[in-house]
Image (cartoon, grey):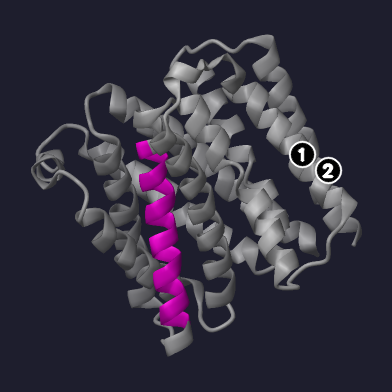
């Protein structure tokens, strides 16, 4: 049943949300966002390579190419998202990044991968409305927004769409352990070009290395295994909408663990996202 695929994507998104909260915790301790992102992917790569070692899978050219694109998409998603935060605000960056379902749906329709449907458009609109309420982007003044921040935020969403499609196509040619190994190797190479290497080395000698390992295992290793497995069993648009559980989980992590407050409109936004994703899961099950 398709609901199995949607539920796996939701589980992956929950782990991404928890990882985002843990990443915020590490940022508060002074680590740069790009170094945190680098360790998230690279530690995840080590776990995936271990899995690949015990269960090797065949490699072929189409799978390798699409996996490389997927890794670039993940790196672009995290990298542009961090740039957007620095040039505007978290609210603007998050809202723009979660426009990904729109890009996914339009690309799917243009290339005739999916049929245009009112229910999917409504799901996207409701989810976007929930994200706007959750991030409270409407409180951000024009002075806090720059062109680079807007462009980077949209690029983050497009990169999100890139890794969704790339994983989807790579999955047609290979097994998850091989796809994820190549994807995160390319991710690590791309991130090495932009991070502060001296800071990255200092992590190995810090007391936070344990948190980085936890972040990598759940935020990249296990979560992307669940995601790519779920993506095989559902459409790209459904997967992109279901993944919007991520900001809800991150907000709940901040509320429960970091003692952050949530306004009524933010709670309403979380409710809209959860109801929409649940309705989508139910509809996929009926199909």
**x and y, in percent, of residue 110 in the image:** 72, 68
Please name whichever residue, 24 or 163, is drawn nearer the observer in this view of the structure: 163
Q: Residues within 10 Å of mark 1 (few under 14, many from 20)?
A: some
Please name whichever residue, 130 or 158, is drawn nearer the observer in this view of the structure: 158
**x and y, in percent, of residue 65 in the image:** 42, 79
> Which quadrant of the rendered structure holds the N terminus?
bottom right
Work out whether 176 lies above or below 164: below
Task: Look at the image and tell me whether residue 277 can be seen.
Answer: no
Q: Residue at x 63, y 10 (%)?
A: 263
Classified by dominant secondary structure, the portion drawn in magenta counts as helix
Q: Which residue is mark 2?
A: 122
Which image quadrant for residue 247?
top right
Q: What kind of element bears circle 1?
A: helix
**x and y, in percent, of residue 194 in the image:** 22, 50
Which image quadrant for residue 181?
bottom left
Work out whether 41 lies above or below 201: below
Q: Residues within 10 Å of mark 2 (few under 14, many from 20)?
A: few
- Between the residue at mark 1 and the residue at mark 2, the CA separation in whole angstroms equals 5 Å
User: Magenta part of the protein: which range?
Assistant: 63-83
Q: Which residue is mark 1?
A: 125
With 98 as the anchor, is 184 left or right in this view? Answer: left
Task: Look at the image and tell me whether residue 160 can be seen.
Answer: yes
């Amino acid at each position: 049943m398709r609901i199995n695929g949607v539920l796996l994507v939701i589980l992956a998104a929950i782990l991404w949300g928890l990882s985002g909260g843990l990443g915020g915790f590490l940022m508060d301790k002074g680590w740069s966002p790009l170094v945190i992102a680098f360790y998230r992917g690279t530690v995840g790569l080590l776990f995936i390579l271990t899995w690949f070692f015990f269960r090797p899978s065949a490699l072929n050219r189409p799978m390798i190419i699409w996996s490389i694109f997927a890794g670039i998409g993940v790196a672009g998603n995290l990298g542009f998202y961090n740039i957007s935060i620095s040039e505007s605000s978290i609210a603007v960056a998050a809202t723009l990044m979660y426009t990904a379902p729109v890009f996914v749906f339009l690309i799917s329709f243009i290339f005739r991968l999916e049929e245009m449907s009112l229910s999917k458009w409504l799901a996207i609109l409701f989810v976007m409305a929930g994200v706007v309420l959750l991030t409270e982007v409407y409180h951000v003044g024009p002075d806090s927004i720059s062109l680079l921040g807007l462009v980077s935020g949209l690029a983050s969403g497009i990169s999100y769409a890139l890794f969704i499609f790339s994983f989807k196509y790579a999955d047609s040619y290979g097994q998850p352990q091989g796809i994820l190994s190549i994807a995160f190797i390319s991710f690590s190479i791309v991130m090495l070009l932009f991070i502060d290497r001296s800071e990255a080395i200092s992590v190995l000698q810090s007391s936070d290395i344990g948190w980085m390992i936890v972040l990598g295992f759940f935020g990249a290793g296990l979560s992307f295994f669940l995601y790519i497995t779920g993506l095989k069993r559902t459409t790209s648009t459904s997967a992109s909408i279901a993944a919007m559980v991520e900001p809800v989980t991150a907000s709940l992590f901040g509320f429960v663990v970091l003692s952050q407050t949530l306004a009524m409109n933010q709670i309403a936004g979380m409710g809209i996202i959860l109801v929409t994703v649940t309705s989508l899961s139910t509809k996929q099950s009926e199909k």
